[in-house]
Image (spheres, rainbow, N blue to C red):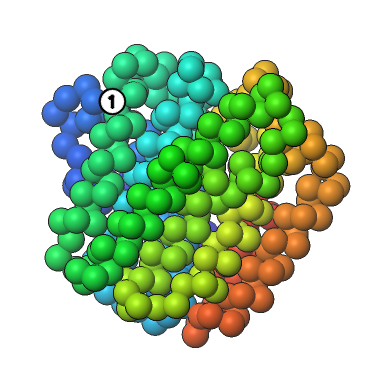
Amino acid sequence: MLESFLSDIRSQVITDTEDLIKPNSSVAKAMLYTATAESKCFRAALVHATAAGLAFNNITAIRELAVCIEMLHSYSLIHDDLPCMDDDDLRRGKPANHIEFGESTAVLAGDALQLRALQVIVDSTAIDADAKIKILQNLLTSCGYQGMILGQELDMLAEQDPTIDIRKIHSLKTGKLIQSAITCAARLQDSNTNIDDFEQMGWHIGMAFQITDDILEFTQTSESLGKSNLSDAKNQKLTYVSKFGIEESKSEAQQHIQTSLEVAKRCLEQPNRMMDLAKMVLGRTS
């Protein structure tokens, strides 16, 4: 049931991305290369799960937000993999964007994906004007210099300074966009929705997601992950496993998911889909 739901979301995201980006330049082709590659589309699924939990059924608005969030995620992956960042050669089971298209094209593709994603919200005729403003404010803050970008900066600085707070890195670099997928989806139904519970739920799911990533990089092969399992070690990255050990990392991830389940029951009319996604975070192998 859950796998069928995720498969449908992946198909929708690919279809919508291909409708939004025409492959008429090298940069556009590079954008599509990463944005339509095989992936979990977990963030898009969170958008749909939040909407379903609130009984919001404007499918056009939901799909627009979902593809926006996934394009923002793809942009961040392209830039993270660059030689000047994490210097990774493999992503989503394929050569990283800069390996396939060259470094300069990859930089431009990441930049263009970020802008194209936000343009989807601006151009939408399905999303209420007040909701648009609050969604854009959320995304700009979450992805900006005090959000996801700061997380990447701290992640790089922590290669030389292990005293930097790993929880802060994870909550910014990974957690912010996962949090936005949920809080922005809550805005679709009512721009004035109190999003405190949604922010809390997203924060806990985001933390558990990245802690699990750290565990998987320590326990899985590159083939199963679709990316290098030696990246963190090569770059001397600060991770949950290197900081706290694998058992404590597993325990904390489980605590985050348990809290997210409790919040989902509190803030969603129909929490089952969200709860299934949260539980999936701990059970995944890639």
Q: Which residue is found at the position 31% from the left and 16% from the top?
A: 104
Looking at the rendered structure, the secondary structure element under dot 1 is: helix
Asked if 144 appears above or below 262 in the picture, the reply is above
Give the residue at mark 1. Answer: 108
In this figure, what is the number of numbered marks? 1
Asked if 147 appears above or below 186 in the picture, the reply is above
Q: Quadrant of the C terminus?
A: top right
Q: Which residue is found at the position 31% from the left and 47% from the top?
A: 14
**Residue 72: percent from left, percent from top:** 37, 44
Type of the residue with mark 1: Leu
Residue 216 in view here: no
Residue 90 in view here: yes
For this view, does 195 lie left or right of residue 168?
Answer: left
Q: Which residue is found at the position 22% from the left and 22% from the top?
A: 26
**Residue 175: percent from left, percent from top:** 55, 51
Question: Image quarter for residue 48?
Answer: bottom left
For this view, does 180 lie left or right of residue 20?
Answer: right
Question: Image quarter for residue 242?
Answer: top right
**Residue 151: percent from left, percent from top:** 54, 39
